[in-house]
Amino acid sequence: MDHHAHATVFKASLPVAGIDGTLRHRLNGTRAEGQVLAKTGSTVHVSSLCGYATTRHGERLAFTFLFNHHVASSAQARAVLDAAVRVLVD
């Protein structure tokens, strides 16, 4: 999608970490704040985070993290997903 004719519109539709949408209260106060555009998803025992992360060196990475049939709480799953994204940005 990064090179698609509608890439700009697509990226603009994604929530920004620490700023808006479903990521408004996630990754606040970290290097990932404002550097991650992503879509969240969840259902019973499933959590995901997919989108783009800009590294501290300015490289843009596409990523997808998905936990399927996890036994952790939703909050614990989100914390692990957020930690994984912080690794990408750092």
Image (tube, helix red, strand yellow):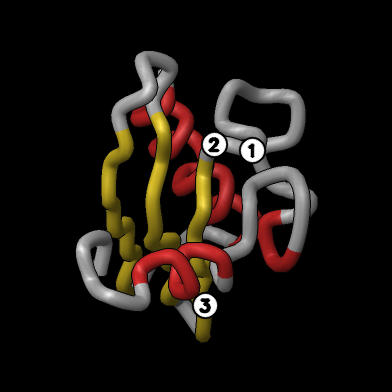
Q: Residue at x 23, y 72 (%)?
A: 4
Residues at circles 3 and 1 in contact by the CB criterion of under 8 Å: no
Q: Is residue 65 left or right of residue 90?
A: left
Q: Amino acid at mark 2?
A: Gln
User: Disc 2 designates what residue?
Assistant: 35
Q: Is residue 89 left or right of residue 27?
A: left
Asked which secondary structure carries label 1, the reply is loop
User: Disc 3 designates what residue?
Assistant: 42
User: Is residue 71 among the parts visible in the rendering?
Assistant: no
Q: Which mark is residue 34?
A: 1
In the rendered image, residue 18, in percent from the top left (x then y), is placed at 73, 44
Residue lying farthest to the front in this orientation: 5
Q: Quadrant of the N terminus?
A: bottom left
Q: Amino acid at mark 3?
A: Ser
Residue mark closest to the camera, 2 vs 3? 2
Count of marks placed on residues = 3
Residues at circles 2 and 3 in contact by the CB criterion of under 8 Å: no
User: How many neighbours does mark 1 have within 10 angstroms: few (below 14), some (14-19), or many (20 or more)?
Assistant: many
Dot placed on the residue nearer the N-terminal end, 2 or 3:
2
Most foreground residue, 41 or 61 = 61
Dot placed on the residue nearer the N-terminal end, 3 or 1:
1
